[in-house]
Amino acid sequence: MGTEGEVAPPPSLLQRVVIGRNPKITALRLAIWVVLLLIAGKFVLLRIQVEGISMLPTLKEKGVHLVNRQAYLFHPPRRGDIVSIRLAGEHLMYLKRIIALPGETIAFHNGQAVINGQVLEEPYVKGPCYWEHEPEVVGPNEYYVVGDNRTMDFYDHEQGRAERSRIVGKLLL
Amino acid sequence: MSGRVLRLLLLAALVALGVWGWRLLHPSPEHIIRKELAELARTACVPADEANLRKLANAQKLASFFTSDAELTIDVPGRFSQTISGRAEVQEKALGARSMLGGLTVEFLDVNVTVAPDAESATARLTAKANLPGDSVPQVEELKVGFKKVEGDWLIQRAENVKTLH
């Protein structure tokens, strides 16, 4: 006849809620979550805060958003995508909408974007716009990007052809 | 056994301390240039109530970051285009700007430094962020800054803005 070992008392409700039934498994889960969050923060998601009014009314000033760095892993950027464009690095980036793709010709006439001679429907653009700009061809590895706020003067608004390598990702939300 | 581990740990700590000390005494050109750029940004800031003598001293200090034949080109299509040649002109323009831009703050972000193989020249790419008094949105420009080693000092020989969007 053997003797029975001591049975540990069941964990209290507070302990179960805070660290679970098995602290080792909870610690492992926590470590996995931390690693996943670090990977997501480094390679997938990028948190950005909007400064400026060039993407009004779509993106409000001081709004916080996430950019998906992996959005263009399986397909190239598309017209209408809002993308982040790096300068020397990723501390400060432009947030703009792609309106013309590589090889296309873009112009602005009577405030409307004209792509390959066709007026581009842009429901996201509100307010008056009077931009006039001669046609220019977007290079083979470039995308024409512009903000949604076209009420600003053409030269006060950062816009133009961005190299593909500068596009960091697509605005997620 | 534990004594051997302790000795190994002590040795590793001494090696780390030696490496740290060596780096402190012999900083790499990249480290020196980064430090210099940080100092340049600090000098470029203009306090709101800067006294005239301080303005002159800071303009002189700002010019001291440049070679005597330095060339600065800033071209923002439709808005602003200017070329500044030589240290004397840098000082003159800096003094003029300091008189008009009280409250200006300047930051250099994302500094990437590439040192040439001969370690006599280097190029830094960075994003300059300037908050002008009265402007709610900062001015942002990507810059390419060329450094040259002159008598042991790294000085700016050329600087130009990079067109992120063409």
Image (cartoon, rainbow, N blue to C red):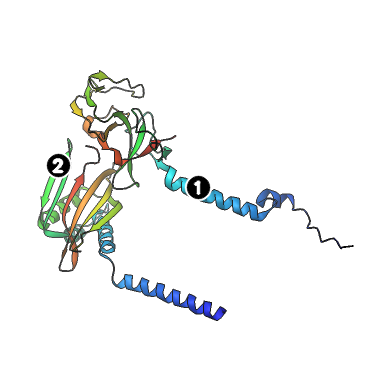
**Mark 2 vs mark 1, CA separation in Å:** 45 Å
Mark 1 sits on what residue?
A37
Label 1, secondary structure: give it: helix
User: Residue sitting at 21 percent across and 61 percent down?
Assistant: B117
Residue B104 visible to the viewer: no
- In-image side of A136 versus A2 (left or right): left
Name the outermost residue toward the front. A1
User: Residue sitting at 73 percent across and 49 percent down?
Assistant: A13
Name the outermost residue toward the right. A1
**In this view, A108 is above or below A29:** above
Circle 2: residue type: Ser
Residue B45 is situated, as x and y percent measured from the top left of the image, at: 26, 54
**In this view, A80 is above or below B163:** above
| Residues beneath discs 2 and 1 located on the same chain | no
Mark 2 sits on what residue?
B81
Residue B133 is situated, as x and y percent measured from the top left of the image, at: 27, 45
From the image, which quarter does the N terminus of chain B lie in?
bottom right
Residue B31 visible to the viewer: yes
From the image, which quarter does the C terminus of chain B lie in?
top left
